[in-house]
Image (tube, coloured by chain):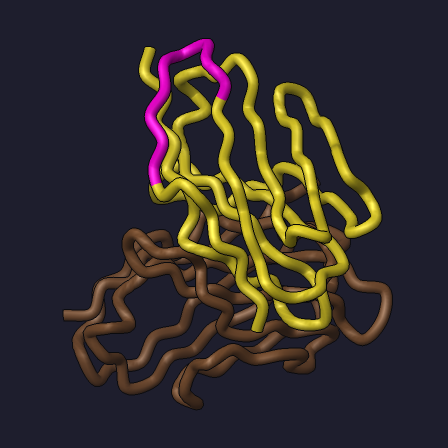
């Protein structure tokens, strides 16, 4: 069973640039969620995708966008980077029977550490 | 959105002692989940307890849930240095899983 993998592991960008983070879901999982975790804080929900459709969104601006592909891998795109976007970005996959679900355990990758200078 | 609040924020114990951390919340839930995070790594799911369950065990972990008090506790028995991590509760209902700030556990050998 392949776990959740994220790439890259570390990334340094300049304010105003754009970034794409990638995630491969655990085999058999059809739902992917993205979280942002600032230093010393808990993970903050960005959005969730179920069968390629956005299924829920947290309090993040539109410059945070995502995609889920037919193989259930996913991307998180952030435009016009700001210094406060510096954080650990976590991808988590899970299974849902229909319509997406928030009740299943999440399987997390080890994250991408993004630094914006 | 619903968010659990973990208590204490930090806990330091000797190896072999038991560690207890608590989670309080304000809304109704379908289930409550506990996760562990080692420094700089992803979260690892530990245990899920449903709203109609009162207690659940997994190895050295014991979780209780009191829906009338809207609280849960995670007990780690016979702690080890490898248990050093941050522990988060997450509430599950009709909204996405929301995590609190966690409890930072340090187990000293």
Q: Residue at x 32, y 16 (%)?
A: B108
Q: Quadrant of residue A20?
A: bottom left
Q: Which chain is brown?
A: A
What residue do we see at 65% from left, 51% from top? B69
Instruction: Estimate the x, y position of residue A84 in percent, counting from the top left.
Output: 24, 73
Residue A80 x, y percent position in the rendering = 28, 86
Q: Quadrant of the N terminus of chain A?
A: top right
Chain coloured yellow: which letter? B
Q: Quadrant of the C terminus of chain A?
A: bottom left
Q: Is residue B11 shown in magenta? A: yes
Residue A69 seen by the camera: no
Q: Is residue A26 above or below residue B87?
A: below
Find the magenta span and give its range: B10-18
In percent of width and height, residue A106 lies at: 63, 53
Toward the front, the furthest residue is B68
Question: Is-magenta flag for residue A47?
Answer: no
């Amino acid at each position: 069973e392949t776990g959740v993998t994220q790439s890259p592991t570390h990334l340094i960008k300049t304010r105003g640039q754009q970034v794409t983070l990638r995630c491969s879901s655990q085999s058999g999982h059809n739902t992917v969620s993205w979280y942002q975790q600032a230093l010393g804080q808990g993970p903050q929900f960005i959005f969730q995708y179920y069968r390629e459709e956005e299924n829920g969104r947290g309090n993040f601006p539109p410059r945070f966008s995502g995609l889920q592909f037919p193989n259930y891998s996913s991307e998180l795109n952030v435009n016009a980077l700001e210094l406060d976007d510096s954080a650990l970005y976590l991808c988590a996959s899970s299974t849902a029977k229909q319509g997406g679900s928030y009740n299943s355990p999440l399987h997390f990758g080890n994250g991408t550490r993004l630094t914006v200078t | 959105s619903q968010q659990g609040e973990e208590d204490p924020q930090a806990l330091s114990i000797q190896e072999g002692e038991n560690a207890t951390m608590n989670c309080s919340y304000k809304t109704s839930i379908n289930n409550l989940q506990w996760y562990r995070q080692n420094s700089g790594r992803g979260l690892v799911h530990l245990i899920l307890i449903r709203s109609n369950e009162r207690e659940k065990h997994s190895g050295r972990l014991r979780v209780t849930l009191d829906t009338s008090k809207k609280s849960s506790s995670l007990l780690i028995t016979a702690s080890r240095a490898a248990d050093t991590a941050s522990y988060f509760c997450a509430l599950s209902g009709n909204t996405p899983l929301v995590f609190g700030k966690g409890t930072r556990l340090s187990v000293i050998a």
